[in-house]
Image: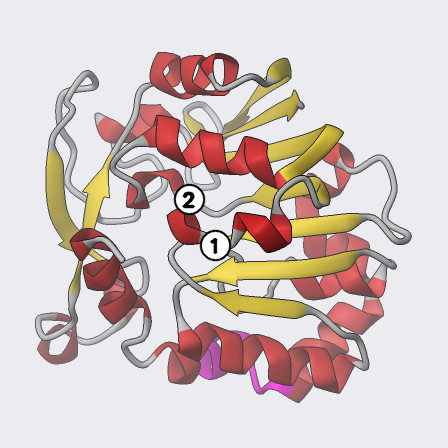
Amino acid sequence: MRDYSRQNKKAWEYNAYEFWTKTSGTPADRAKRDLENPIRMLRCYANYFDSYDQVKVANICGSCGKKAIPLALLGAEVTVFDISEENKRYALEVAEAAHVNIGFEVCDILEIDLEKYGNYFDVVFMEGGILHYFHDINEFMRIMYSLLKTGGKMICSDFHPFTKIMDTLKLEQPTMSYFSTEIFEGEMAHARFYEEEIRSQMPKCSYRKYTISEIINSIIQNGFCLKRFDEHPSWENENLPGEFTAVAIK
């Protein structure tokens, strides 16, 4: 495992289970909401799936299962790949309470077992801001391509690169030149929800943020056929970009 991956793992295993129970409810409470309306729990991402039943989905950096479990409830065969044991614990407890099965592999995404999972999935899906955890986006996209069957689909939704120069999502992360290639340390996503005394002690993550062209070119150069690239408004200010979704086919 790379040094920066170890650093990010340490951050994402810091009180993560406790955080999810405080913000998303107990596993039973979360499962109840997932069961009530799994499509609603998928939010806008439901628009990018053609079907669910028996579709094999790799949920990359799937965190606490907040999208994996709704997908499983809709009939998909979901495997979460994530670096945090704490996330796995919460996700599997929610899945059990919702009476569905999901796979969950705790690993460095760049070290996924391709002998087992190469050419295996119909869809690779990611959301919620994950690209900045990887220092080489081309290496990341090569892995995504390798996971898919021929004809499979990648749904890559992430924070809009505009957030490099303006904190349009109020994530309280540092801004920089749009064209910066700097690798920097910053707070993990949950830090802003804690009191300063705890926040100051939380492990930092190692980040590398990308431009739109870097993202699009990495998709194309690693063999994908880019089908669409949608930009979405910030949830804080609908006049500014907040997220994007790229859809590409192997």
User: Tags 1 and 2 in contact by the CB under 8 Å rule?
Assistant: no
Q: Quadrant of the C terminus?
A: top right
Which contiguous range is marked in magenta?
20-27
Q: Residue at x 70, y 69 (%)?
A: 102
Q: Helix or strand or loop: what does disc 2 sit on?
A: loop
Front-most of residues 18 and 65: 65
Looking at the picture, does residue 84 appear above or below residue 234? below
Q: Helix or strand or loop: what does disc 1 sit on?
A: loop
Amino acid residing under circle 2: Gly
Q: Is residue 110 left or right of residue 47?
A: left
* Image spot of residue 202 (x, y percent): 16, 72
Name the residue beneath numbered marker 1.
Answer: 61
Q: Residue at x 49, y 63 (%)?
A: 63
Front-most of residues 15 and 53: 53
Q: Is 109 covered by the magenta stretch?
A: no
Residue at the far front: name it. 115
Q: Is residue 62 left or right of residue 77?
A: left
Looking at the picture, does residue 143 appear above or below residue 77? above
Looking at the picture, does residue 181 appear above or below residue 236? above
